[in-house]
Image: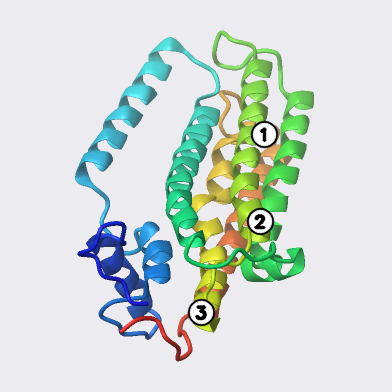
Amino acid sequence: MPVDPRLPGEPTMLEVGSTRLWLGRRGVRVWLPTRLLALRIGARGFGLPNRPVQIVIGVVVGWVFSRLTAVLDVPGRGAAVAVAFAVVQLVRWRRVQHRERLAERLVPAGPPLPLRAGARQVGWAYLSAVAVTFVGGAVLCAATFLVAPRFGDYRYPLWVDIALSTAALAGCAGAAAVVLGKALRSPVIAEDETSRLVDAVLRGEDVYRYTRCAVYALFAVPVLMMAWQPPVLLELAAWGYVAVVAALELTGWLLQRHRYRRLPPGFYGR
């Protein structure tokens, strides 16, 4: 049934507006979307501007952190950026899951999505980006540990920086696994063929919205973030690694946008 934001327990006006904008970008014009779609699409805040307060707080905290670490000569600055980014993305994802649980109550529970079907919806380009990010990152961390000198330009041993970066990469892998596992194996939340299609679109979009492999590749791998001059071959390998991850992620995102640029006719609301 179409949603009525005036009633208690219904999607909010912001969620309804976000859903209308999301559908409109894909060729669907509705005034009031269905309750299920408004809960699921609206929870992701598509098209809503970021709050200025959040932007100001983020800029101030980032500036203070950079100044503090520069003065205190603290190792693992790149690792801290990667972990902070992963935590923020995971918190945003967790907030969406609250609305997802409400949506699940509106439809009968279904079986988990088959792994192969989930992989097709997420896209092989993104799955390849994940594999390259964390497998390639682990290889680069090990190579850096083998060739790095004991001390760099700062007082602390370089192995401390390498250890922190490796731990950050592992933490980012855990955050990515949570989001990706949900996208690959969670049950389909749908009441008809239209909402089933939207479910597939949201699965493919969520991994890009809440897990950015290129950020992890750039900041969590120690080669480019440490205070030392790495061997030329290792530095080229690190930049090539970042470029491959970014290219795979961008390719997957473009393919996802092209695949669902227009939604087929169906009942999306009224």
Please determine whether, in this image, residue 182 is positioned above or below residue 37: above
- For the question of whether residue 116 can be seen, the reply is yes
Q: Residue at x 55, y 80 (%)?
A: 259
Looking at the rendered structure, which numbered label has been put on residue 129? 2
Side (left or right) of 147 relative to 163: right
**Where is residue 256 shown, x and y percent of the image?**
55, 72
The amino acid type found where label 1 is placed reads Ala
**Rendered location of residue 143, percent (x, y):** 77, 32
Looking at the image, is mark 3 or mark 1 nearer the viewer?
A: 3
| Mark-to-mark CA distance, 2 and 3 | 21 Å
- Asked where in the image residue 237 lies, by quadrant, the reply is top right
The reply to whether callout 3 and callout 1 are in contact (CB within 8 Å) is: no
Q: Nearer the viewer, residue 261 or 181?
A: 181
Q: Residue furthest top?
A: 155
The spot of residue 31 in percent (x, y) is 25, 80
Would you place residue 251 above or below residue 157 in this image? below
Is disc 1 surrounded by few (<14), some (14 to 19) or many (20+) residues within 10 Å?
A: some
Q: Secondary structure at mark 3?
A: loop
Figure colour scheme: rainbow
Which of disc 3 and disc 2 is earlier in sequence? 2
Judge whether 231 appears above or below 205 on screen. Answer: above
What's the residue at 50%, 42% (across, down)?
90
Mark 3 and mark 1: Cα distance apart in space = 33 Å
- Alpha carbon distance from label 1 to label 2: 16 Å
Amino acid type at circle 3 is Tyr
In-image side of 255 versus 57 (left or right): right
The image quarter in which residue 267 lies: bottom left
Q: Position of residue 212 (x, y in %)?
A: 53, 50
Residue at the disc numbered 1: 170
Q: Which circle marks residue 260 in the picture? A: 3
Residue placed furthest toward the bottom: 265
